[in-house]
Image (cartoon, rainbow, N blue to C red):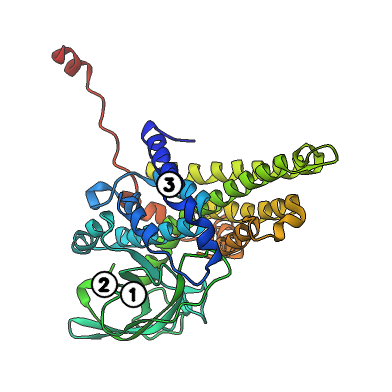
Amino acid sequence: MFETDDHRDLRRQARDFAHAEIAPHAARLDAHPGRVETEIVKAMARPGWLTAAVPAARGGAGLGHVAKLVLLEEISQASPAMGAALQASQLGAEMFLHYGSDELLAEWMPQFSLGERLATIAVTETESGGHVLGMRATGHRDGDRWILNGRKTFIGNSHLADVFGVVVRTAPDSGRSSRSLSAFAVETKRAGVRLAPYAPARGLHGFSFGDVIFEDVAVPAAHMIGAEGEGMHVAYAASILAGRLCLAGLGIGIQHALKHDTITYTTHCHRYGGALSDLPVIQQRIGWITARLMRSRTAAYTAAHLLDHGQGRDIDLIHAKLEASEAALDSAGDAMRAHGAARMRTDRRVGQLAQDAWCVEAAAGTSDIQLLKLAQDATGNGHLPYSVRLADRVALPPPPAPPSKTAREHAA
């Protein structure tokens, strides 16, 4: 859908990589929830996939959002955890794209594109969750630097990233002013940055989303992302323009895996003189899994295509994440039921895929948050869409105009 020959070539490249470099290790990743995978993530970074949606003029690969979705769909089929790792660093790079100064982009984006550094965002806190304005982490000015303190939680690629896009409170506030927050690029090796011991998660084994602690971390003022007081916009733009679409791709990949495993199991398992897949009740479940996958792909690729062409809408991106994550949960239920008692076996990944789907639903705002945002837009209580504010930064450059008739005649 909306794919060009370049997109199809990229899909083959990603699929070959997934089969050769990820699939042989997927069972190992699922079996060791306390281990953070590093080598596969580094290998995914080398082809420039971390900056797929960043225009070439700003230091990225310049492939576009449809291309980014292609990558996530293929990688996540082989391992949702590795799809999560890929999207977390794509999200980090795009945070720099949206509000980073020319100097910050020149310093960091080439490193992200070459896979030399991994970026991620650090916004969420335990006591504020999806309510960004409720955060408590702080930053205060000290000459030509800022001093940051606080703790961030559920940070994707927490134990792999080289730089965090951190949002903190830089002005005393009751928690309601959108101008009270600011964002900074903070290297993980900077004094005072500390990782909490990694606690294994229930899903997405091999992917780290842990806690990062900042204790009197001195950051150069030049490392501010956006202007002082723009932290809320930096966080929301990253979540809406990058996070929602990335997670939709992850949800779509999980649905593909659920469909594949359900069809494989039910066609090879025989009952009552025939394959399980011949039973009408199983066919119904496979039909629903297929329908949800088609619906999710339509929503996500439409949103990505519009974003590439400067016609993006925030609500389409929000809807794409809602559709794909809810579909993954519903299809996980159908897949589990189609597997019967076999779903309890550890050599069947359907149970792990169900846990992975729950992790996707929670990220970048649960489905309740997505529905709230859709309702706010429908009732006229939304904000100026970030897809409009930042269209010049996120859209692909227009294709060159075809030569005029005069030029063609002259060439002839």
x then y, percent, for residue 118: 32, 63
Q: Which mark is residue 182?
A: 1
Question: Are discs 3 and 1 less than 8 Å apart at CB?
Answer: no
User: Which residue is tagged 3?
Assistant: 20
- CB atoms at circles 2 and 1 under 8 Å apart? yes
Residue 351 is situated, as x and y percent measured from the top left of the image, at 65, 59
- Residue that badge 2 annotates: 224
Q: CA distance from mark 3 to mark 1?
A: 42 Å
Picture residue at 30% right of the left edge, 69% below the top? 162
Q: Residues within 10 Å of mark 2 (few under 14, many from 20)?
A: many
Residue shown at the point (51%, 50%) measured from the top left: 78
Residue 222 in the image: above or below residue 405: below
Specify which label sits upstream in the sequence, 3 or 1. Answer: 3
Mark 3: give few (<14), some (14-19) or many (20+) Cα within 10 Å: few
Disc marking residue 255: none
Q: Amino acid at mark 1?
A: Ser
Element type at mark 3: helix
Tell me if 402 is positioned left or right of 75 in this view.
left
Image coordinates of residue 101 in percent, x first then y, are 23, 63
Q: Amino acid at mark 3?
A: Ala
Q: Is residue 198 left or right of residue 401?
A: right
**How much space separates mark 2 and mark 1, taking CA atoms?**
7 Å
Whether residue 369 is situated above or below residue 70 in the rendered picture:
below
